Image: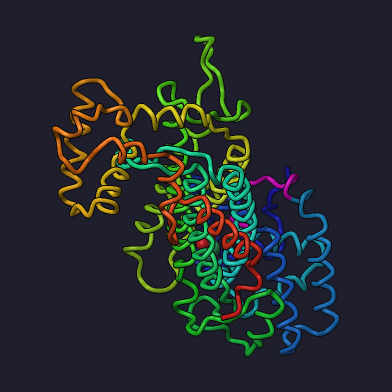
Amino acid sequence: MAGPKSSEPGYAGGRLWGGVADRPPAEAVKSLTYSFAFDAVLLACDLSVNRAWAEALRRVRVLTDREAKRIQRGLARMEREADALLRQADRAAWEDVHTFVEVTLHRRVGDVAKKLHAGKSRNDQVATDLRMYVKELLTRLDGLLRGLIAALLEKAEAHAQTPFPAYTHMRQAQPTVFGHYLMAYVAAVERDREDLRVRYNETDVLPLGSGAVSGSGFPVDRRLLARRLGFRGISANSIDAVGDRDFVLGFHLWAARLMIHLSRMAEDLIVWSSDEARLVRLPQEFCTGSSLMPQKLNPDVAELVRGKTARVIGHAVQAMALLKGLPSSYDRDLQEDKEALFDSARTVQDCVAVWTGLVRGVEVDEKRARGFFQSGFSLATDLADALVRERGVPFREAHHIVGRVVRWCLDNHWRLGDVPADVLADISPQVDSKLLKGLGLESALASRDLTGGTAPKQVRSQIRAARRRLSRVLRGAQVP
Ligand code: ARG
């Protein structure tokens, strides 16, 4: 395992600093301050930033063409060998990824490596690395979200007219189709995609050139740096640029909301697949069994997606707590932005991928759903609507009449569709068997034929519109 050597010429104890201190940091300080154990993830970004910087220094003649070439070669080789470098490195022994890069480069190309840090600070460097990381992450997540939406749309299409009880307060409320629920999920995930673009654009600003805090002492072309590193803009204020982690906080808040969406879907499916409801079957490959009870196949995946949501929310809270007391510009506290970010990044990607698989395998028990409409009272609103529509009864009165009918059913254990004519007549002269007979699940569904409604025709048009939006990719959306 390779770590820094204490004999490294010019890099006291493998550090990028040390002239000012007579003594090296205490051993105990290392485990608190060293970040390579986790910021090694940024190696590829850090190498790209260094390569762009070398070119910028060449253009302002801080590096000669020859020196720049030598540095570029060394960095390019490190890029090619990045995996091996990381495997061989003693992660606990290096202060951070920036130190690792410079000292390793020095070992390969010699003292010319010592010229590379002119006008650059780890403060603007880490801010740049991290933005590159978040941009890549968001791009990958947008792809994953598109996959999730595609899976939801496919299911929605298959169930555009599969009756399903619509719930409020976890009580059966009105009729819907299963596809309408799935399209509700699509609406939420589409908001996440919309917001992802905002997060991406906010992140797509280059801090490099800000130096430690006041701006680089060398007049490098920052626009050129931005182009080379794939950033759309450059930061306008160096003090802000080195201390700004709004893009990290923005990611956390975004991720937390996305997870809340997944968690609510998970909760729906857990309830609907319960032994009591049995409306939905979860795919076996996305359930796990009990070590003791042979009959059990538990919704652990859905439960863990719900559980992981707490973790991602926790990281968002940590990011806010981290930032709230910080003075302007860079403070070392900011190093604490990373582990939470990397953890949420992994968690969210895993959850979206798993959830997409689960969605694909979900099945609906249509017979059981239809049974609920016969035994339950989900068509009560439709009876009240019929009184309004066909008998001209004011809605508030219709509501009261139907309420009395339902009460009678509950007290006498009858189904709504079977209430005898004399009972109806007793309750109100306006409600009769003919009106009751007109009550049907299919017509109740079809009657909600307006934008956003549950009529299968409307659900299909929602699906078509969402398909069109799905084809838009992140790249095309970046233009302001
Ligand atoms: N490892 C630090 C971080 O993650 C970056 C280095 C800046 N360190 C410093 N002493 N200025 O924020």
Q: Which residue is found at the position 29% from the left and 51% from the top?
A: 390
Where is residue 259 drawn, in percent x and y? 47, 48
In this rendering, would 189 be left or right of 322?
A: right
| Chain part drawn in magenta | 86-97
Dominant SS in magenta: loop
Q: Which residue is found at the position 33% from the left and 63% from the top?
A: 324
Which quarter of the figure is the C terminus placed in? bottom right
Give the camera-side residue of 283 and 220. 283
Above or below, 135 against 424 in this view is below
Where is residue 89 drawn, in percent x and y? 71, 47
In this rendering, would 8 be left or right of 195?
A: right
Residue 61 on the magenta segment = no
Where is residue 170 drawn, in percent x and y? 32, 36
Regarding residue 92, the answer to whether it shows in the image is no
Q: Which residue is found at the position 29% from the left and 44% from the top?
A: 381
Above or below, 192 against 117 in this view is above
Where is residue 130 drawn, in percent x and y? 57, 63
Regarding residue 263, the answer to whether it shows in the image is yes
